[in-house]
Image (cartoon, coloured by chain):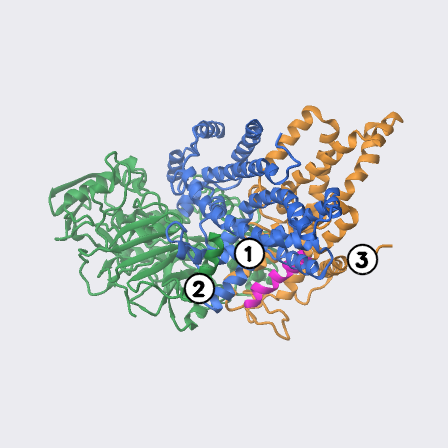
C-alpha cells in the first residue's frame, strides 16, 4: 500500500513538471503585461521601464523561468505582482474557501444522491426510477451560474431572506458563515446531486447484473439484504472514483459560482489574476489545481480497496 | 426493430428543434440581431418583441435564434476538432507504443490533470477570445480525454485474434488500423462526442459568463446572460431566456446521449 | 451529522438577516481589493480612495480641483518660484497619539524621496522628468521648506495628486525597524483597523481628529469630521451584485453604473447622486494607419457620429456631450471648449468622397470592462458609422490585450477612456507627443506640440486661455481623438445616510452620518 502510494506520487512528478513548465511559458504568450496594466494610461516609457525592472520582468524569460523553478524547489511560489502577497499562503487561504464550499456541497449531495441512485437502479424502469433519473438529468442540465442567478433573484432580491453579497468564513463565525454559504452550496449541491445520482445508479446496475448477486438471490436472501450487503457496498466503489473526478472538476467549475456570489475562492483568484496578468499567481493557481487533482485521484485510488474488496491497491 | 426509448424521443425532439433553429438563423430572424434601437431599450416581452429587447434595444428572440446557430456551429467544430485530433493521437500512441506512447501520454496526462474548463480558460487567453479561439482552446482542452479512450480501445484490441489475423493475411499496419481498429472506436467515441457536445456548450457559456468567451456583439447564450446580468432586476427576461435555452439544450443532449449509449454500448447503461 | 444539523439551524436563521446590524457602521462596496496600505506606492484608484481616509498631505485638492493647504495652515512661494515654505496647523495628532511636527514631515518626505520607497510620483520630483526637489528641511517644529531646481506651475498640483497619495504625512512607526512597510499611522479622520485581503477593509473613527477649517466638505479640504464609529469597505467586484446588495440593504453606499441610476432612485430606501468628473471617454484614431492617415476620412468619421444620441444612450440620459479634453468643471472650460464636432451626415458623405474612401473595413477595438463604456460607445459608433457608409467593425478584446495594442500603437480606432487630469497642460500632454518616442501617443503634430509645451510653463490663467482655445480648435481639425463625454460619478446610498456628495469618483465617507 505504502509502496503503491509512493510510486504514484513519484509518477506524478513528471506530470506536474510538464504542467509547471508549460504554464510558465504559455502564460507569457498572452498579450498584455502586468507592468503596463498597473500603470494603465499613465505608462510613460521611464516609469514603465522602472516598474518592469522592479518586478523583474526586464530579465529574459529563461532567466525568469530559472528563478521561478529555483524558488519552487524551496516551496516558494513567489509573490503576487499586484498585491505583493506571497502566493502560496494566498492560494491556501483562497483554497480553503473553495474547499469548504465544494466539500459541503458534495458531501450533502452524496448523502442523498447515492442511496437514491441505488434505489433507482434496484427498481429499474419503475416510476420511481424514471422520476429520479429524470430529475437528476434535469438538475444536471441547468448551468450552475444560471441556477445561482435565479436563487439570487428569488431569495436575495424578491424575498430578501438571504444576504446577496459578502462572505464570512466559517472559522470566524459559524452561524453567520452558514448564512453566506447557503445559496452557493445549494446551487452546487443541486447540480452535483444530478451528477452523482446518475453515477450511483449506473454502477449499481452494473453490480446487480453480476453473478454473485444472482447467487445471493438464489441463496434466498431478501431483496433488502441483497441490496444492503452486496449491491450497495460494491456499487460505491466506482461511484467513489467518480466523486474524485467531480471534486477535481469542481475546482474549475466553482469559479463561476464564486463569481455569481462574490466568494473570494480559488476560482475567482485565478480569473482575477488572469485579467490582471499576475503571472506568479496564475502559475501558482494552475500548478496547485493540477497538484490537488492528482492528489485527490491518488487518494481515491488508495481508498478504492476499502469499498471494493475485489480490487487491491497493488 | 427496437422501440425508441422516451428519452430518445424527447432528446431527439429538442436537438432536432435546436438544429432547425440553427439552420433557420442562417436565413431568417424576426429582426436583425445586431440592429440597435434607441427607442426600444429594455422593452418588456410583448407583441412587437416577443421576448423583449436588451440594453441596446436589440430583439432578444432574434439574438437567441442567432446564438443557437453560433452555439451549434462552435460545438460541432470543437467536437470534430477534439475527436479527430484525439483519435489520431490515440491510435498512433496505442499502435506504435514504446517511447512515442510514453512521451505523448505523459503530456496527455499532464493536460488531463486540469479540469477542462480551466485548461480552456488558459488556452483561450493565449489564442485570443474569438469564435475560432474558442474552438481551438476548447478543442485542445478536450482532446486528451478522446486520446485516452481511443488509446485504451486500441490497446485492448491490439492483441485480439482478428487483428493478428489481419496481419497474418499480409495487410499493412495502416490498413489494419483503419479497417479494423477505427470501427471499434466508433461506439465509445459516439457516446463521448455526444456528451462532449454538451460540455462544450456549457463551457462556452461559462467562459462567456466569466467574460472570456465569444466576444460580443455576436450573440451567444452565455454572453447574452453575462451582458444582461446587470439589468436582470429591471428586465427579468434578459436573465431568464438565455439560461432557459442553455438548460433545455443541455437536457436534450443529455437525454439523447443516454439513449445513444444505451443502444451502442449497453455496458455503460445509465452512466 | 454536523452538516445536517446545520441545515436545520440554517432554515431557522434564514429569516431575519436583511438590514444593517450596527447603526454606527457604514458599509461601502468597492469594486476591487486595495493593492496595499502603503500610500502612493502600490496603488490604483480604489486603493487611493480608501487610503485617503487614513492619511493627509501638506496640500490637497479642493472641490473645484484647485490646490489648497491641508496639514499646512498656509504656504508661501518665494519670488523666484524656487522655495516653498509650509507652516503646519497646530494641535494635529497621529493615530498613535503623537503630535505632528515638521520632523515627521521631514521624515515622510525623506522616505518618499528615497528610491527604495518606490513612490510612484518620484520621477516627477527627482529630475527624471525635469523638475527636481533640491532639498527638504525643517527649520522649526511648525515649518517645512522645500527647494526646487526650477520654477514650476504644476508642483503643488503634483503634491496634491491622489495617485501620489497627496504625499501623505506618516508617523515613523508606520514602517518596521528594518524599514519595510507595516501599516499607515496617519492623521486622517479614520484609522485602519483591519484589512482582510480579498474581503474587506475596516476603518474606525479617529477620536482626536482635528479637521481643517471650514463649515463643509470641500474636496479633500474643508470640514472632514468622522461622524460614524466604523467604516467597512467590502469588496464586490461585480457591479450587478453590488446593485442587488444596495437594494437588499447589505450595502449602504456604492458607486454604481449609469444604467442603474433610474432603477435605484426608484427604490424607496435608496438615493442616488450624479456628478461629472474629469475622466474622458472617446475614440482614439491611429493617424499613421495607411487608411486613417487621411485627415478627410477622420473628419468624416467625426461628422458621422450623432453625439447627443450616442452620449444619451451610453449614459442612460445622464451625460452631456464634451468633445474637449478639458473637464467641464475646470475654470478653463470656456465657450471655445463647448464648441465641439458637428454631426452632419451630408458633410460626412461629402468628406468620404473627397477622401476617396471605398468601403475598406475599419476596426474599432473595445473591451467589456464594466467600469468604462468602451463597449457601448463602440457598438453605437459602429452603427452610426455604418449608417454613414463607413464599413466599421468591432473587435472586442480583453482589456490587457487592448492596452497592449494602445501602448504599441497597433490599432485603427480604439474605444478608450483617459484617467482624470485637472490641469489643461496635463490634459493635452496625455494625448499628444512624438509617436516615435512613445507609440501610445495619439496626437503627433510638431507645431501643436509647441503650444502644449508652452502651457506647462505659463501660470497666468489669462495668458493660458487663448492657447487652450487654439489647441482645442486644432484638435477638432486634426481629429486624432474624438472625445465624446466625461465620466459620471454615480453614488447610490441608503436614505439613512446624511451628507453624501459625489466628487471625482472618490468615495469620501467623512462628514456622513447615519440616521435611524
Is mark 1 in CB contact (under 8 Å) with mark 3? no
Instruction: Determine which of the numbered discs, if any, sits on residue B217 in the image.
Output: none
Few, some or many C-alpha atoms within 10 Å of disc 3 (few <14, some 14-19, many ≥20)?
A: few
SS at mark 3? Answer: loop
Rendered-image quadrant of the C terminus of chain C: bottom left
**What is the chain identity of the residue bearing mark 3?**
B
Q: CA distance from mark 2 to mark 1?
A: 26 Å
Q: Which residue is mark 1?
A: A145
Q: Is residue C138 above or below residue A119?
A: above
- Please report the residue visible at 66 percent of the width from the left and 60 percent of the height from the top: B248
Chain C, hue in figure: green
SS at mark 2? Answer: helix
Residue B136 lies, in percent from the top left, at 64, 43
Q: Which residues are magenta?
A: B236-251
Few, some or many C-alpha atoms within 10 Å of disc 1 (few <14, some 14-19, many ≥20)?
A: many
Q: Quarter-wise, where is residue B92 in the image?
A: top right
Instruction: Determine which of the numbered discs, if any, sits on residue B4 in the image.
Output: 3
Chain A, hue in figure: blue
Q: Which residue is mark 2?
A: C12
Amino acid at each position: 500500500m505504502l509502496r503503491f502510494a509512493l510510486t504514484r506520487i513519484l509518477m506524478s512528478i513528471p506530470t506536474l513538471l510538464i504542467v509547471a513548465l508549460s504554464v510558465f511559458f504559455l502564460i507569457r504568450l498572452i498579450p498584455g503585461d502586468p507592468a503596463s496594466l498597473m500603470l494603465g494610461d499613465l505608462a510613460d516609457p521611464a516609469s514603465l521601464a522602472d516598474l518592469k525592472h522592479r518586478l523583474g520582468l526586464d530579465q529574459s524569460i529563461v532567466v525568469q523561468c530559472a528563478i521561478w523553478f529555483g524558488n519552487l524547489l524551496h516551496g516558494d511560489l513567489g509573490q503576487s505582482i499586484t498585491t505583493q502577497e506571497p502566493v502560496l499562503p494566498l492560494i491556501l487561504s483562497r483554497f480553503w474557501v473553495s474547499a469548504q464550499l465544494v466539500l459541503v456541497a458534495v458531501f450533502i449531495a452524496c448523502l442523498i444522491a447515492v442511496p437514491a441512485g441505488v434505489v433507482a437502479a434496484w427498481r429499474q424502469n419503475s416510476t420511481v426510477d424514471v422520476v429520479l433519473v429524470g430529475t437528476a438529468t434535469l438538475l444536471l442540465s441547468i448551468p450552475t451560474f444560471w441556477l445561482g442567478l435565479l436563487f439570487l433573484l428569488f431569495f436575495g432580491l424578491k424575498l430578501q431572506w438571504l444576504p446577496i453579497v459578502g462572505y464570512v468564513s466559517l472559522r470566524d463565525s459559524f452561524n453567520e458563515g452558514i448564512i453566506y454559504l447557503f445559496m452557493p452550496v445549494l446551487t452546487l449541491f443541486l447540480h452535483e446531486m444530478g451528477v452523482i445520482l446518475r453515477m450511483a445508479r449506473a454502477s449499481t446496475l452494473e453490480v446487480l447484473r453480476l453473478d454473485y448477486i444472482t447467487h445471493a438471490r438464489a441463496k434466498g436472501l431478501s431483496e433488502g439484504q441483497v441490496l444492503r450487503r452486496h449491491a450497495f457496498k460494491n456499487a460505491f466503489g466506482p461511484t467513489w472514483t467518480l466523486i474524485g473526478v467531480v471534486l477535481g472538476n469542481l475546482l474549475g467549475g466553482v469559479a463561476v459560482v464564486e463569481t455569481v456570489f462574490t466568494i473570494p475562492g480559488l476560482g475567482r483568484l485565478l480569473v482575477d489574476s488572469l485579467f490582471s496578468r499576475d503571472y506568479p499567481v496564475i502559475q501558482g493557481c494552475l500548478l496547485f489545481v493540477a497538484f490537488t487533482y492528482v492528489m485527490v485521484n491518488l487518494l481515491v485510488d488508495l481508498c478504492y480497496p476499502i469499498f471494493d474488496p475485489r480490487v487491491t491497491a497493488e | 426493430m427496437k422501440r425508441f426509448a422516451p428519452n430518445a424521443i424527447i432528446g431527439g425532439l429538442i436537438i432536432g428543434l435546436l438544429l432547425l433553429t440553427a439552420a433557420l438563423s442562417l436565413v431568417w430572424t424576426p429582426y436583425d440581431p445586431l440592429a440597435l434601437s434607441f427607442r426600444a431599450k429594455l422593452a418588456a416581452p410583448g407583441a412587437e418583441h416577443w421576448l423583449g429587447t436588451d440594453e441596446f434595444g436589440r430583439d432578444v428572440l432574434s439574438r437567441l435564434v442567432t446564438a443557437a446557430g453560433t452555439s451549434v456551429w462552435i460545438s460541432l467544430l470543437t467536437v470534430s476538432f477534439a475527436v479527430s485530433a484525439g483519435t489520431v493521437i490515440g491510435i498512433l500512441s496505442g499502435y506504435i507504443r514504446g517511447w512515442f506512447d510514453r512521451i505523448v501520454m505523459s503530456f496527455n496526462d499532464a493536460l488531463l490533470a486540469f479540469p477542462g474548463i480551466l485548461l480552456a480558460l488558459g488556452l483561450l487567453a493565449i489564442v485570443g477570445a474569438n469564435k475560432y479561439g474558442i474552438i481551438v482552446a476548447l478543442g485542445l482542452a478536450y482532446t486528451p480525454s478522446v486520446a485516452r479512450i481511443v488509446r485504451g480501445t486500441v490497446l485492448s484490441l491490439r492483441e485480439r485474434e482478428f487483428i493478428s489475423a489481419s496481419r497474418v493475411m499480409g495487410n499493412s499496419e495502416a490498413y489494419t488500423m483503419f479497417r479494423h481498429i477505427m470501427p471499434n472506436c466508433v461506439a465509445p467515441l459516439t457516446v463521448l462526442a455526444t456528451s462532449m457536445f454538451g460540455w462544450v456548450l456549457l463551457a462556452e457559456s461559462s467562459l462567456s459568463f466569466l467574460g472570456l468567451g465569444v466576444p460580443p456583439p455576436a450573440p451567444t447564450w452565455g454572453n447574452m446572460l453575462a451582458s444582461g446580468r446587470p439589468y436582470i432586476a429591471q428586465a427579468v427576461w434578459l436573465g431568464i431566456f438565455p439560461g432557459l435555452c442553455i438548460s433545455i439544450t443541455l437536457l436534450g443532449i443529455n437525454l439523447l446521449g443516454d439513449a445513444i449509449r444505451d443502444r451502442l454500448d449497453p455496458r455503460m447503461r445509465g452512466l | 451529522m454536523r452538516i445536517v444539523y446545520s441545515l436545520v439551524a440554517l432554515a431557522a436563521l434564514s429569516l431575519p438577516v436583511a438590514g444593517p446590524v450596527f447603526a454606527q457602521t457604514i458599509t461601502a462596496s468597492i469594486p476591487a481589493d486595495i493593492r496595499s496600505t502603503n500610500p502612493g506606492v502600490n496603488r490604483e484608484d480604489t486603493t487611493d480612495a480608501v487610503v485617503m481616509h487614513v492619511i493627509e498631505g501638506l496640500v490637497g485638492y479642493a472641490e473645484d480641483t484647485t490646490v489648497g493647504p491641508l496639514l499646512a495652515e498656509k504656504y508661501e512661494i518665494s519670488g523666484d518660484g524656487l522655495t516653498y515654505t509650509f507652516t503646519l496647523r497646530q494641535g494635529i495628532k497621529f493615530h498613535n497619539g503623537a503630535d505632528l511636527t515638521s520632523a515627521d514631515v521631514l521624515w515622510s518626505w525623506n522616505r518618499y524621496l528615497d528610491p527604495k520607497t518606490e513612490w510612484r510620483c518620484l520621477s516627477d520630483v527627482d529630475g527624471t522628468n525635469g523638475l527636481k526637489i533640491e532639498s527638504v528641511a525643517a527649520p522649526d517644529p511648525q515649518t517645512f521648506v522645500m527647494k526646487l531646481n526650477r520654477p514650476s506651475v504644476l508642483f503643488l498640483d503634483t503634491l496634491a495628486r491622489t495617485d501620489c497619495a497627496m504625499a501623505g504625512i506618516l508617523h515613523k512607526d508606520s514602517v518596521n525597524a528594518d524599514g519595510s512597510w507595516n501599516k499607515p499611522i496617519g492623521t486622517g479622520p479614520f484609522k485602519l483597523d483591519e484589512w482582510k485581503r480579498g474581503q474587506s477593509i475596516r476603518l474606525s473613527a479617529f477620536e482626536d481628529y482635528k479637521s481643517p477649517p471650514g463649515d463643509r466638505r470641500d474636496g479633500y479640504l474643508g470640514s472632514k469630521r468622522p461622524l460614524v464609529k466604523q467604516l467597512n469597505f467590502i469588496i464586490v467586484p461585480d457591479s450587478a451584485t453590488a446593485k442587488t446588495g444596495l437594494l437588499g440593504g447589505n450595502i449602504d453606499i456604492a458607486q454604481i453604473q449609469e444604467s442603474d441610476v433610474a432603477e435605484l432612485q426608484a427604490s424607496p430606501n435608496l438615493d442616488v447622486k450624479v456628478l461629472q468628473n474629469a475622466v474622458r471617454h472617446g475614440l482614439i484614431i491611429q493617424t499613421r494607419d495607411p487608411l486613417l492617415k487621411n485627415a478627410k476620412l477622420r473628419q468624416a468619421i467625426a461628422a458621422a457620429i450623432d453625439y447627443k444620441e450616442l452620449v444619451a444612450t451610453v449614459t442612460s440620459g445622464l451625460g452631456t456631450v464634451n468633445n474637449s479634453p478639458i473637464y467641464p468643471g475646470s475654470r478653463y472650460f470656456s465657450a471655445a471648449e463647448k464648441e465641439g464636432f458637428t454631426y452632419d451626415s451630408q458633410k460626412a458623405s461629402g468628406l468620404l468622397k473627397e477622401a476617396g474612401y471605398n468601403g475598406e473595413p475599419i476596426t474599432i477595438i473595445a473591451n467589456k470592462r464594466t467600469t468604462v463604456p468602451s463597449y457601448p460607445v463602440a457598438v453605437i459608433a459602429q452603427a452610426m458609422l455604418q449608417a454613414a457608409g463607413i464599413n466599421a467593425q468591432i473587435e472586442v478584446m480583453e482589456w490587457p490585450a487592448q492596452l497592449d495594442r494602445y501602448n504599441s500603437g497597433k490599432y485603427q480606432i480604439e474605444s478608450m477612456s483617459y484617467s482624470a487630469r485637472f490641469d489643461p497642460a496635463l490634459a493635452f500632454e496625455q494625448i499628444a507627443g512624438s509617436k516615435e518616442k512613445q507609440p501610445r501617443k495619439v496626437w503627433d503634430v510638431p507645431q501643436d506640440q509647441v503650444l502644449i509645451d508652452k502651457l506647462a510653463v505659463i501660470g497666468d490663467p489669462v495668458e493660458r486661455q487663448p492657447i487652450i482655445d487654439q489647441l482645442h480648435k486644432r484638435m477638432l481639425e486634426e481629429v486624432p481623438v474624438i472625445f465624446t463625454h466625461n465620466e459620471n460619478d454615480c453614488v447610490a446610498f441608503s436614505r439613512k445616510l446624511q451628507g453624501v456628495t459625489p466628487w471625482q469618483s472618490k468615495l469620501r465617507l467623512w462628514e456622513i452620518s447615519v440616521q435611524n
